[in-house]
Amino acid sequence: MPRLKAKAILRNKGFGIPIQPKMRYKLTLEGELNITPYAANQRANYYLVMHVGNLVMSGEPELEFRKEGTYWRLPAILTSPDVGHVGEIGEIIVDAQTGVVAEAESTPIKEMEKNAESLAKEKTL
């Protein structure tokens, strides 16, 4: 089974794993994902271009495990031709099995637009 090159972060979403300082856990998960990190990035980018604008792109995907399924969490990043990476304006959640953007759990489009405007003014683009 090929290894994923994306960062996988286990977020404590109902797994009941106590988070305490100086404790060490080793957890092995095995399974198949239908959506690779690359495919999740493509789907998030398509969503952002279609709903927010062409100067917004997704960043590096992180794998998130929940009781209800496995998801890719990707930052939504404002870019500029002159500056490059300006900053994060929200996040996109992509279902790792279906590839569908979980709009209800992603940052709302209006909020991303507002964050992008504020960030652009702050950075004087």
Image: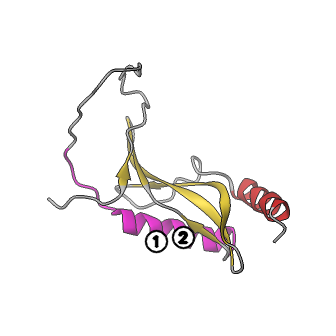
Residue appearing at x 66%, y 77% in the figure? 54
Q: Magenta region, mostly helix, strand or loop? A: helix
Task: Tell me: residue 27, above or below residue 76.
Answer: above
| Crowd rating for badge 2 (residues with CA inside 10 Å; few <14, some 14–19, many 20+) | many
Q: In terms of image quadrants, where is residue 77?
A: bottom right
For badge 2, the amino acid type reads Asn
Magenta span: 30-53
Please tell me whether residue 54 is drawn above or below residue 29 in the rendered image. below
Q: Secondary structure at mark 1?
A: helix
Q: Judge by depth and name the residue closer to the eye, 46 or 8.
A: 8
Residue under numbered circle 2: 45
Mark 1 residue type: Gln
Question: Nearest the camera: 92 or 89?
Answer: 89
Asked if residue 62 is among those painted magenta in the image, a careful observer would answer no
Residue 6 percent coordinates (x, y) = 35, 58
Residue 9 point in image, percent of width and height: 39, 43
Residue 18 in the figure: left or right of residue 114? left
Residue at 38% x, 59% y is 98
Of all residues, the one furthest to the left in this rendering is 1
Please state if 82 lies on the left or on the right of 34 as rendered: right
**Residue drawn at 54 percent across, 65 percent down:** 58
Q: Find the distance from the CA under tag 2 to the CA under tag 1.
A: 5 Å
- Judged from the image, the secondary structure of the residue bearing numbered disc 2 is helix
Circles 2, 1 touching at the beta carbon (< 8 Å): yes
Residue receiving disc 1: 42
Can you give x and y, in whole percent of width and height, for residue 71 in the image?
41, 50
> Would you identify the image quadrant in which residue 76 lies?
bottom right
Q: Which mark is residue 79?
A: none
Q: Residue at x 81, y 72 (%)?
A: 125
Horizontal and vertical percent for residue 116? 75, 62
